Image (cartoon, coloured by chain):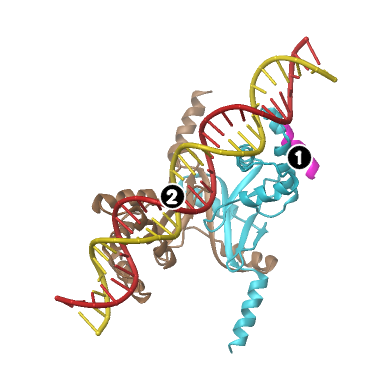
Chain colours: A cyan, B brown, C yellow, D red
Amino acid sequence: MEETFLEAVKEKMRQKGYKITGPRLAIIRYLTREKGHPDIQEIFEDIRVEKPGIGMATVYRTVSLLLELGILRAITLRGHHLRYELNWPDHHHHHLVCNRCGQVTEFGNCNFQLMSGEIEQVTRFKIEEHALEAYGLCPQCLSARLDYSTENI
Amino acid sequence: MEETFLEAVKEKMRQKGYKITGPRLAIIRYLTREKGHPDIQEIFEDIRVEKPGIGMATVYRTVSLLLELGILRAITLRGHHLRYELNWPDHHHHHLVCNRCGQVTEFGNCNFQLMSGEIEQVTRFKIEEHALEAYGLCPQCLSARLDYSTENI
DNA sequence: CTCACTTTTGATAAGCATTATCATTGCCTG
DNA sequence: CAGGCAATGATAATGCTTATCAAAAGTGAG
């Protein structure tokens, strides 16, 4: 899976005439390993562990290249700074963010298509994509809060 | 409606001990008039028409105050910079963004509650809020594109 | 395999947006 | 209406992102 994806990425870069360099490969490999939603700073720091000489500018340039190629997707949660995730094929999902600890979970249950027809009729837009974020309390913070309420009875 | 809302805002500010000043009032009044989704620069420029002496810092400070009080909501569309809209009571809606011209339209048809139960069961989160954005082509850009395709036949 | 060409890299400077500082102004309570 | 303190506006400082440029590295031809 990871290897197939990596090959597909390389092929896409070759097609567009971009060179497959050490820093770029390191970043792509890191992103296929990392299953979270790192921001640019985290990417930089993690990559530096294995490639100490890498520069911040290269990380910025590589990230925007991968965005342009559709390999990477950017998400903003609560309007905070950008976080990134690989755009795995056939992995439609959305994000659930804990209001207390900030933990991000993915969920796949999305029946947006049930609304989209109606929205298209009302607005006359032709909808191509959508993004959904839900905010609430994760199981850990939920039980912590329940404990706290109990204490106060 | 606008006046009632304005009074409610003032009351909330008084309760929290914030002073009701000229610049703050001007910004709130502007936001109740303006029905779009201005960014901080637009707010600054529009306010300066009626209050030429106002400083950018005051606009930033007032916007974050209004966000803190829940009077204003921030939205990020496509991860671009923040835009703002008043948090009118009982006005649940989402945003539809044109991929070509950037026009933003609101829509109210949202049946998120149909998914939320299932998501809560699967993830064990307690969902409190959600945000949905749809991207596509607005009616104008849609017909422009159709014309264009026709030309190429 | 080597060379030559072109892109990419890393270090650094430059550019913007946002936040902090601080003397002055102006709300608000008594 | 006067005193106290928060808010303002101008400006400096900060921090994130992009631009610049010489050196290094990838690629394709021979």
Is label 1 or label 2 in front? Answer: 1
Residue that numbered label 1 is attached to: A6
The quarter holding residue A71 reads top right
Q: Position of residue D20 (x, y in %)?
A: 52, 30
Q: Position of residue D1 (x, y in %)?
A: 14, 76
Q: Is residue B127 left or right of residue B148?
A: right
Magenta segment includes B83: no
Q: Residue at x 68, y 69 (%)?
A: B124
Q: Nearer the viewer, residue A84 or B118?
A: A84
Q: Residue at x 59, y 63 (%)?
A: B114
Label placed on residue B105: 2
The quarter holding residue A96 reads bottom right
Determine the secondary structure under disc 1. Answer: helix
- Cα separation between marks 1 and 2: 38 Å
Q: Which residues are magenta?
A: A1-11
Q: Nearer the viewer, residue B68 or A5?
A: B68
